[in-house]
Every structure is written in structure tokens, then in C-alpha cells.
Image (tube, rainbow, N blue to C red):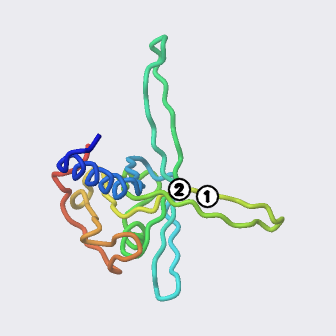
Amino acid sequence: MEIPVQEESLKKEHEHYNQQIMRGVNRVMLIGNLGKDPDVQFLEGNIGVAKFSLATTETFKDRTGKLISQTEWHTVVLWRGLAELAQKYLHKGSLVYIEGRLRTRSWEDKDGNKKFATEVVGDNLIMLDKKIEGSHSTISPQEGMEGLNGSDSATVGEPSPDLPF
């Protein structure tokens, strides 16, 4: 049986589309509270790196109607301008929206055992704390940095009306 030309064309287009889209998605969106003040270090070339723990809590009712809270802890890493802003404005308990990607790194400890750590590398930060001497602040990749390729500084502005929540 011969496939008509139009169906053949659609089949090839579908295969091409599937090959392009099957690369995967690595995107994380979290809203939570800092578990500690950001630990900020500056690498060679004055590149800032901030690291902190972030707690996200989900609350739901079990079968009996009892309210249950589950807290997950995440390690967040911010680079360059976002690291500097974290150092300046974030502290233990700060409520933030973080958007980024997962990164797993590995190393060997002093005993030769292989260790792994999965972290959220943030490329968008929105401070959600109540207004104190100013306004809510939004730092986006366009204003601050995107992954490791952003500028070394970021600005503080009004929150975007396009927030995903």
C-alpha cells in the first residue's frame, strides 16, 4: 500500500518534531522560606555564589480529616548578581519564589566514597516578604542574570503581573 504524499509529508514532519522536543525539560519552581542566611562566597574574577537551604511546606488533610504538613528541604545556588542580592536582602525566614533548574554534582569524600548532591540553580528570584521600607522585589534573568551567562549586577523592580501563582 502506498502512502499518499500529504500523509508522508505529515509523518516526516511529526518525526522531526518529536526528535526536537524529546530533549527534555529541567525546570523547577519553588516558593518557600530560607532555612538560614545565605552563605556567599566570591570566586576568582569576583564572581559571587550564594548557597542556602529553602523549606517548602505542603499542607493537606489525611483520610480522617487531620491536617498534615510535609516540609521538603532544597539547596539553592545563585550566581553573580543574584548572589549579591541574596547577600544584601535575604535572611533566615525570608519568603521567596525561586525558578531554576536541577543540577546534581558528585565528588569523593576523604575516605574515597562517592557522594552526590542535587541543587536548584536559580535563574529567577522574587522576594515575597511583606513590604518593609520599599516594595516587593523581582529579579529576573533579563534584569540580573540567566544561569552563568548573566551580567554581574541585577536591579530591583516591581513584581511582574505574569506570576505563575
Q: Position of residue 44 (x, y in %)?
A: 52, 87
Instruction: Identify the amino acid type marked 2.
Output: Thr
Residue farthest to the front?
A: 1
Left or right, 2 with respect to 56, comes to: left
Q: Position of residue 35 (x, y in %)?
A: 51, 51
Q: Earlier in the sequence, mark 1 or mark 2?
A: 2
Q: Are discs 1 and 2 less than 8 Å apart at CB?
A: yes
Please, what secondary structure does the residue beneath circle 2 have?
strand
| Closer-to-camera residue (67/79) | 79
Q: Is residue 134 above or below residue 9?
A: below
For the point 48% across and 51% down, which residue is it?
Answer: 54
Q: Is residue 58 above or below residue 108?
A: above
Q: CA distance from mark 1 to mark 2?
A: 9 Å
Give the residue at mark 2. Answer: 75
Q: Could you say which disc has been placed on residue 117 in the image?
A: 1
Residue farthest to the top?
A: 64
Instruction: Identify the amino acid type marked 1.
Output: Ala
For the point 36% across and 53% down, which residue is it?
Answer: 96
| Closer-to-camera residue (132/98) | 98
